Image (cartoon, rainbow, N blue to C red):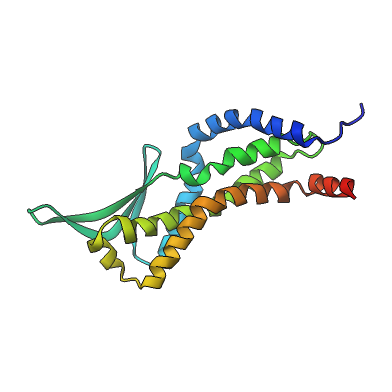
Amino acid sequence: MPQREFSPVRYFAQVLLWLPLFFVIWYYLAGLLTIIPAHLSEWFIQLIRPGTLVEVDWVNRKLEYITSFTLVAGDAGRSGNVVVTLNPLIYSWNIPVLLALCYSVGDKLFSNTRVIIGLFALMPMHAWGLAAEFFIAVMFRMGDSVAQQMEVEQWQRDLAALCYQFGYLMLPVIGAVSVWFLANRALVQQLIDRRK
């Protein structure tokens, strides 16, 4: 049977057809898909500022980072550890995008191994976003009493904001496309050669 020539329109139509299915699967498997990024983000945070975290918990599709920072609550003067709650799905929506891109290539170029490697390649990018948002929450959202416990300079606050924006806006898109590109070099090379 002759192989059909690659059509970008047909390819992106297939991607759009796969996306809803993979978004549903991703949403229901979020707990499993967040285990590695949660541990990596914990490691990143402890590497950047040792002793910051006491524990990381998974609660109702959210990650709770229990910190060593304290906060006094109310007139009674009771204090407790600050808890930063983050939604890991914000940084991992590129998983269904990558899956749709990978499953839309022809059978000749498809590989389950490359898909699995691609998913693992995205995990550090998700962890980056989580770690950056953690620092943003502590430095900017939790109030001055918590931010002062961080003892950071202005340039460190600016760097945290830059890392957060990069992890929130850029890495999900760049990550999925880059991983797909690297996993499908043969297809990309075919398209380049065809243009010559």
Residue 181 point in image, percent of width and height: 72, 49
Q: What residue appears at the point 35 percent right and 73 percent down from the top-left corner?
A: 153
Q: Residue furthest left?
A: 76
- Total labels: the figure holds 0
Q: Residue at left 57%, top 43%?
A: 94
Of the pair 71 and 161, the residue shown nearer to us: 161
Q: Position of residue 152 (x, y in %)?
A: 34, 71
Q: Which of these two is toward me, 126 or 162? A: 162
Q: Residue furthest right?
A: 2
Q: Could you say which is closer to the camera, residue 140 or residue 37? A: 140
Q: Is residue 167 left or right of residue 189?
A: left
Residue 38 showing in the rendered view: yes
Quadrant of the drawing holding the N terminus: top right
Whether 130 is drawn above or below 107: the answer is below
Tell me where residue 113 sits by quadrant: top right
Residue at horizontal 34%, vertical 65%?
51
195 sits left or right of 101 in the view? right
User: In the picture shown, does residue 132 fall above or below 35?
Assistant: below
Q: Residue at x 66, y 51 (%)?
A: 178
In the displayed structure image, the side of residue 183 where residue 192 appears, left or right: right
The answer to whether any part of residue 47 appears in the image is: no
**Residue 109, quarter of the rendered image:** top right
The spot of residue 159 in percent (x, y) is 45, 66
- Residue 183 in percent (x, y) is at 72, 48
